Image (cartoon, rainbow, N blue to C red):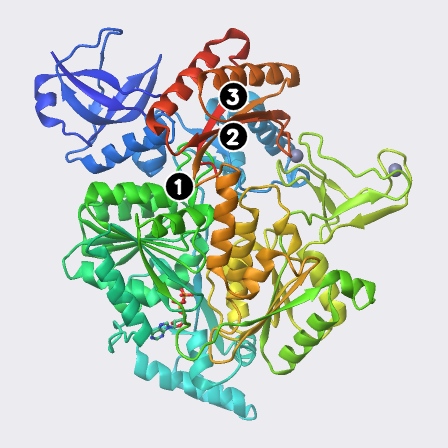
Amino acid sequence: MFFVEVILPLALAKTFTYQVSESEFLFIKKGMRLAVPFGKSKIYTAIAVELHQNEPVLYQAKEIHQILDHEPIVTPIQIEHWFWMANYYMCSIGDVYKNAMPNALLLESETVVTAQLSTFVNEIELSDQEYLVYQALQQQSSLKIEDIIAILNKKNVFPIIHKMIDKNILVLQEEISESYKPKLVRYIRLHPQYNSQEGLTLLLELLKNATKQKEIVLHYFQLNAIEKKPISVKKLVESAKVTAATVKALVDKEVFEEYYVQQDRVTYSGDVASKELQLSASQQAAFDALQNQFSQKNVCLLHGVTASGKTEIYIKWIETFLEKGMQVLYLLPEIALTTQLVGRLRLHFGDKVAVFHSKYNNNERVEVWQQVLNNSEKAQIVIGARSALFLPFQQLGGIIIDEEHEQTFKQTDPAPRFHTRDAAIVLANFHKSKVLLGSATPSLETYYNAQTAKFGLVILNERFGYAKMPVIMLVDLKDNYFRKQMKGHFSGALIQEISATLSLGEQVILFQNRRGFSPVVECMTCGHIPQCPQCDVSLTYHKYKSQLRCHYCGFAIGKPTNCHSCSSIDLTTKGFGTEQIELELLSLFPSAKIGRMDQDTTRGKYGFEKIIDSFKNQEIDILVGTQMLAKGLDFDKVSLVGIMNADTMLYHPDFRAFERSFQMMTQVAGRAGRAEKQGKVIIQTYNPLHNTIQQVTRNDYEGMYKEQLYDRQIYKYPPYYRLIKITLKHRDFDKLKEGALWLYQVMSQSLDMPVLGPEEPAINRIRNEYIRTIMIKIPQNKPIGSTKKTIQKIVNSFEAVVQFRTIRVGVNVDFY
Ligand code: ADP
Ligand code: ZN
Ligand code: ZN
């Protein structure tokens, strides 16, 4: 008898054995997809991982339904990597498989929809039927179409589901969310009515008295004659030396019309840069040093200050692999950053650059998957976020991980909860390829690995060209309040610097940390603050929509007119966020154009790109934003950066708070003065003497590193200890408490290492489920593999206890 061992796309820890005929046995190769029956009546897409003749002892092997591929679509290295991942991150192989593959390659017999968790849902805006579906998905993580038919008690549910998918509330499990809209480039062309000879005469007549506008039109013709390709608004503005507003006026007049092209999907038709990239002397030195290090090390860290031109060094490095016909993977922390980069890389590599990320639709993802699998030239360089790590590389030469310190490289939910950097290093090992990590503010773990010679290290300490590091000024908030020099949240110094910057026609970025600054509504009479009924948090006040919202579950109500507790009408708003800063700015600088970049304003279609675009085009003078501003954006007219309040980051209850504060402030500061002019940074704080703030001021990464490392050792944190967090969730508070205690006791008795908990996290209830966590600290001298095995055994026995069976357990390895 002949058998095939397969992985199923289900949260199952094991592989399964199916029976095949002899000819199937001879045809099937490891990495091919098979349609197999599982459970009572379901069909899944499984992947073959082994062919053998050992009949399973515990169950009768079923026969497969169908072979779906002629050739493997998954490589042996991928499968090896998946098993490593399941083992290291303590999750099921089925979870890894499911996460790794584009959904279009994983069709099932039944269509399932799930809630799009990242979408903020305003329940008030839902129709009654939509609300029912949405509610059902609060209880269950997914629904089959037939369940929805039952819930709504009607056959024709597709329109509703379609609508909810449009609103990005639902995702088909076989479809992927399309919430990401890639950057669209704004192009311009002559309105068709002027396309003829007569039209042209008409047009010139129309613009007879508008000299400026006529000039632009003529300029457009010139460009059109030389370029023979679409003309972007940006190009016209630059080459005609006019403002975007003038061009806009011509669009309003219907002389021009605008159209958009999705930039990263367009096949590249332009010329590859004719002149070769010229590295500066220090970039060249850094590049040579890297090459030298790579002759002994598989992983190197490029620690280069902001605007030192790390991207250019990456480009040189990529060239070395392309020459050998090898593939390169370029990982970024944030999808929104891909467009900027794709543009830069295409200049050098033309259409050898492909983009891949989870928010692409199925077809696009499958297309790139195939190109990578076939080692096609079109995808020799792949740019992507986390999910690109799972592509079927054939000849992977190098992996670049830009901004390696970024938290978004760690996947928190769903399983596998992997760290992209760490998983990439393992993948590179399987491929015998090299990994280049880059950052101006490396994570402590990475720097430690570089210091202990596990990784190579190259330091680039100067900015490219004439750009200098920004000057950093501290403003003592306590003193400013005391001397009544504050206007709202702005110190006199900050106001003065903003005025000066604006008067020079330069731009300003103001950074307001999101954490701890959610504005709330508070009763002046009894002190009551409205809470979310499903979560343990206060509702956040959104001024624009006059609403109170929960940021954890999406619950929302209109702003109350009187207190829910004592009915007093004396309500006040507390705390401040970007919205508040924006309002204050409007009254301080009434003539400035102000933009806001936060979760609210970037949520909509093209939100993020729109704001970045208008800021680049100087349609915005002052940009107020949160965390997103810290992520490697390159603006050349920003000469002032203000950090509204440095303290909220510092006092966040997290062992990384100081490290993260340093990274965040340094990165935000790094947006200032990236071109010729030296930038200025103002940090407002109650603790100007705090070590971390001093380190930021002195650009003293080493100082921060040494201090933090010392603390990590004393308080038993990474890199000295590895941390595993176990999260338990249940709706019944007492049951959860009992279960968590049981698990904690068994763990601390069986493991000879620190076990902490069971702890109630700061937010101890989300979506009506209570939460407890247990943390295990594994010292460096303990074998990590066998410790994890023990932990897994304990979790398994916990799940076997009848009264705890309904408690959900999640394991997060290296959870930080
Ligand atoms: P980093 O990623 O280190 O912050 P970037 O790679 O974004 O820095 O470079 C900063 C700016 O300097 C960019 O606008 C980039 O185009 C420019 N630049 C860097 N190196 C070169 C070079 N060798 N030739 C021309 N321009 C460069
Ligand atoms: Zn809530
Ligand atoms: Zn009250």
Q: Which residue is mark 2?
A: 157
Are there few (<14), some (14-19), or many (20+) residues within 10 Å of tag 2?
some
Quarter of image, ligand 3: top right
Q: Is residue 265 above or below residue 15?
A: below
In this rendering, would 433 be left or right of 159?
A: left
730 and 70: which one is in front? 730
Identity of the amino acid at label 2?
Val
Disc 1 CB within 8 Å of nearest ligand 1 atom: no
Residue 808, which numbered label?
3
Q: Is residue 153 something that shows in the picture?
A: no
Label disc, if present, on residue 419 of the rendered structure? 1
Q: Nearer the viewer, mark 2 or mark 3?
A: 3
Three-letter amino acid code at the position of disc 1: His
Q: Residue at x 36, y 35 (%)?
A: 99
Q: Position of residue 179 (x, y in %)?
A: 48, 47
Q: Of marks 1 and 3, which one's residue comes earlier in the chain? A: 1
Q: Quadrant of residue 190?
A: bottom left
